Amino acid sequence: MKLIMAIIKPPKLDSVKEALSELGQSGMTVTEVRGYGRQRGQTAIYRGAEYAVSFVPKIKIEVAVDDGDAERVIEAISKAAHTGSIGDGKLFIFDLQGSIRIRTGESGVSAL
């Protein structure tokens, strides 16, 4: 199993959700996060004064998938989140040792 973590722009959340639904992916975890990468934040103007915003709002999506589905999910997220501009985001892929569905006690891929 794999855990796929995507950091994307907030407006792309619906596109990613739709792309994963089309693949039959039944669940994901979404978190509002703040951070920066190469873009190093941005400058904003508030009431006529310019100030630096060092942390940019982003969305973190976490999806646990079977090894066989990982590449399709990665490709779907990449295409759905792509704008071609700085700050599109990142994908991180982790090996997932296991999973357990608390309600039924199922484990492994069947718990996803």
Image (cartoon, rainbow, N blue to C red):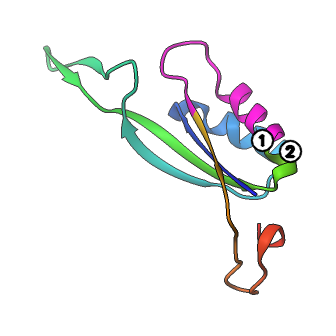
Circle 2 residues within 10 Å: few <14, some 14–19, many ≥20: few
Residue labelled with disc 1: 73
Label 1 residue SS: helix
Task: Say the numbered circle drawn on residue 90.
Answer: none
Amino acid on which disc 2 is placed: Leu
Residue labelled with disc 2: 23
How far apart marks 1 and 2 lie (CA) works out to 8 Å
> Residue shown at 40%/19% (left/top)?
38
Residues marked 1 and 2 touching at CB (< 8 Å): yes
Query: Considering the image in quadrants, where does the C terminus appear?
Result: bottom right
Q: Position of residue 85 (x, y in %)?
A: 54, 13
- Specify whether residue 45 is painted magenta: no
Amino acid on which disc 1 is placed: Val
- The outermost residue toward the bottom is 104
Kindly indicate the quadrant of the structure image that contains residue 50.
top left
Q: Which residues are magenta?
A: 71-90
Is residue 26 in view? yes
Circle 1 residues within 10 Å: few <14, some 14–19, many ≥20: many
Q: Between tags 1 and 2, which lies in front?
A: 1
Q: Position of residue 63 (x, y in %)?
A: 67, 52
Give whichever of 109, 43 is nearer the camera.
Answer: 109
Judge left or right: residue 12 versus residue 49. right
Q: Is residue 69 above or below residue 80?
A: below
Give whichever of 85, 49 is nearer the camera.
Answer: 85
> Residue shown at 41%/44% (left/top)?
33
Label 2 residue SS: loop
> Residue shown at 32%/21% (left/top)?
40
Q: Position of residue 77 (x, y in %)?
A: 70, 35
Query: Considering the image in quadrants, where does the N terminus appear?
Result: bottom right
